[in-house]
Every structure is written in C-alpha cells, then in structure tokens.
Image: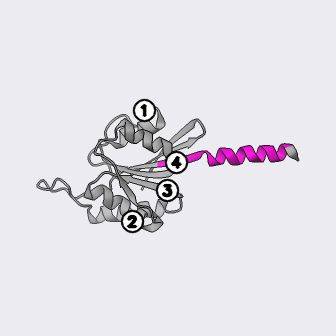
Amino acid sequence: MKRFLTLLGIVLVMAACQHTYYVVRHAEKQVTPQQSNPPLTANGEAMAQHLKELLQDKKIKHIFSTNTVRTTATAAPLAQAIGVTTELYGPKPDSTFIQKLKKLKHNTLVVGHSNTVDDIVNALSNSTKINGDLDESDYGGLYVVTVKGKTIYFKKLTY
C-alpha cells in the first residue's frame, strides 16, 4: 500500500508539472491598403469565437497579444469568457518575453502575427517546429506546445 501511495504521489506531482502554450496567428483581418492596423473580417470574428469555444475549458491562466486591433480582437472572446485580462507584448517576441512565458508554468494563449508565430513556437519548443514565417493567407493554425517535466510535445491543430 505504501508503494502505491508513493507512486500515486509521483503521478500527481508529474501531472502538476504539465502546462500548455496555445499559439495562434490573429484571425482573418480586413485587407485595406490604407489601414496599417485593420480589424478582423466577419469571418475573423467567427474564428475568434470558435477559438474561445475550443479553449475555454483548457484552464488558461494567461493571455498575451500584441497591441493591434486584430490580435486583441482574436483574444477578446476567450479573455471575456474566462475572466482573464489580456497582457500586451511588443511587436517582436524577444528573449525576455519568451523567458517570461517559460516561467509561468500555467496554460497560456499567445496571439501573434504571420512573422512571429514561428519564433514563439520554436522558442517554446526549444527546437524548430515551424520552418519560417506563415504565409500571409494562412489563418486558423493552432500550435500547441505542451511541457511535461523536461519533455516538450508539439502538435498543430486548426481553429
């Protein structure tokens, strides 16, 4: 019995050491040449709602977004649904930001851009999982990086 309780304790500790990063590019944006900070399209707004539905039961404790209309609008439905304030980060995910993410040890959503999602995912994975910037027309990728102890798992889903 003592051995069983010890094993159960180890399993519980290992489960507590698991956390997941969900990294997405902002949902579909309006394309207007004169606008440098465009909003989401109607389809993009629907995508943001679907992202909320997918993630609202994932025990997310932190949400990060760049300070653009399209990224904050992508994060907003989930943030409102789970009562988490979206924290802003700079336009480029530098090593300070990545270290901040790695220290959190909680499930986290990060909303970025076509030229930053790869940097974030690769840094969180400690290896190359995405070989370069996303195509400008690539929306809907949900990149999942799960850390279990010292092991890191990666998978790509869609939303």
Q: Quadrant of residue 98?
A: top left
Image spot of residue 69 (x, y percent):
26, 58
Q: Point out which mark residue 128 bears.
A: 1
Which residue is tagged 4? 20
Mark pair 3, 1: CA separation: 26 Å
Per the picture, the main secondary structure of the magenta-coloured stretch is: helix
Quadrant of the image containing the C terminus: bottom left
Q: Is residue 13 above or below residue 58?
A: above
- Left of 37 or right of it: where is 150? right
- Can you see residue 121? no
In this rendering, the count of numbered labels is 4
Tell me which amino acid carries mark 3. Lys
The mark that comes first in sequence, 4 or 1, is: 4
Which residue is tagged 2? 77
Q: Quadrant of residue 37?
A: bottom left
Which residue is tagged 3? 61
Q: Residues within 10 Å of mark 1 (few under 14, many from 20)?
A: few
Mark pair 1, 2: CA separation: 30 Å
